[in-house]
Image (tube, rainbow, N blue to C red):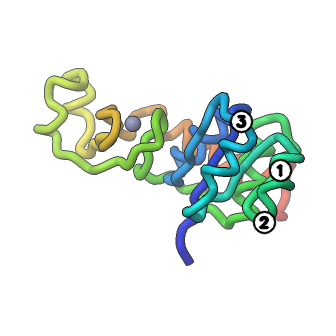
Amino acid sequence: MAEPRFLLDGMLGSLARWLRIMGYDALYVRDASDADMLARLVGNDRTLLTRDRQLADRAGGRGLYLEEGELEGQLLTVVERFGLSTEGRMARCSACNGELEAVGKEAVAGLVEAGTLSGHAEFWRCRDCGKIFWQGAHWRTIRDRLQRVSRGPGSGPR
Ligand SMILES: [Zn+2]
């Protein structure tokens, strides 16, 4: 089965960023009309994630209404519905949703701080905006947060 891809409405910027960190294609569109959002579903297999129940209804089987107002609940809903992996993958740019490509140290020399360059072996570059990524100390924090989300609120097995 093809990996799920998403289209998120203007209220879901944080969720879009986290889906990208998890490695998923999450297109985020701000300030678009309902008609524009629906038009963006034509000709592709994206699922519309929205906080607008009417818009979700209008998208039919292609829309998912997110009841939760906060990020953790939204993430958990999407993770469970689509069976997403919360491992985290360097596949999508968290800033622009562009595809990441692995690049060698020589490609990022001069673009990142010397300490970052010497402290990491792997780097990635966004094909669209050029932003450079590496799995620094923050990556552990990100992974911890994803693990918490995948366990869901409260404790115990689900
Ligand atoms: Zn980018």
Of label 3 and label 1, which has the lower sequence position? 3
Cβ(mark 2) to ligand 1 < 8 Å?
no
Q: Nearer the viewer, residue 135 or 2?
A: 2
Residue 154 image offset from top left, x and y in percent = 86, 48
Could you tell me which residue is drawn at 66 percent across and 28 percent down?
31
The Cα atoms of the two marked residues, 3 and 1, are separated by 16 Å
Residue pictured at 47% horizontal, 43% vertical: 97
Badges 2 and 3: C-beta atoms under 8 Å apart?
no
Secondary structure of residue under mark 1: strand
**Which residue sits at x=83%, y=50%?**
65
Q: Residues within 10 Å of mark 1 (few under 14, many from 20)?
A: some
Q: Residue 137: give x, y in percent of width and height.
A: 44, 33
Position of the N terminus by quadrant: bottom right
Crowd rating for badge 2 (residues with CA inside 10 Å; few <14, some 14–19, many 20+): few
Q: Earlier in the sequence, mark 2 or mark 3?
A: 3
- Gap in angstroms between the C-alphas marked 2 and 1: 11 Å
Give the residue type at disc 2: Gly
Instruction: State the residue position of label 1.
Output: 65
Q: In the picture provided, is 18 more to the left or to the right than 33?
A: left
The quarter of the image holding the C terminus is: bottom right
Is 2 located above or below residue 106 in the figure?
Answer: below
Q: Secondary structure at mark 3?
A: loop
Q: Measuring 67% from the left and 58% from the top, which residue is drawn there?
A: 47
Distance CA(mark 2)–CA(mark 3): 19 Å
> What residue does disc 3 label?
33
Provide the residue designation for mark 2: 61
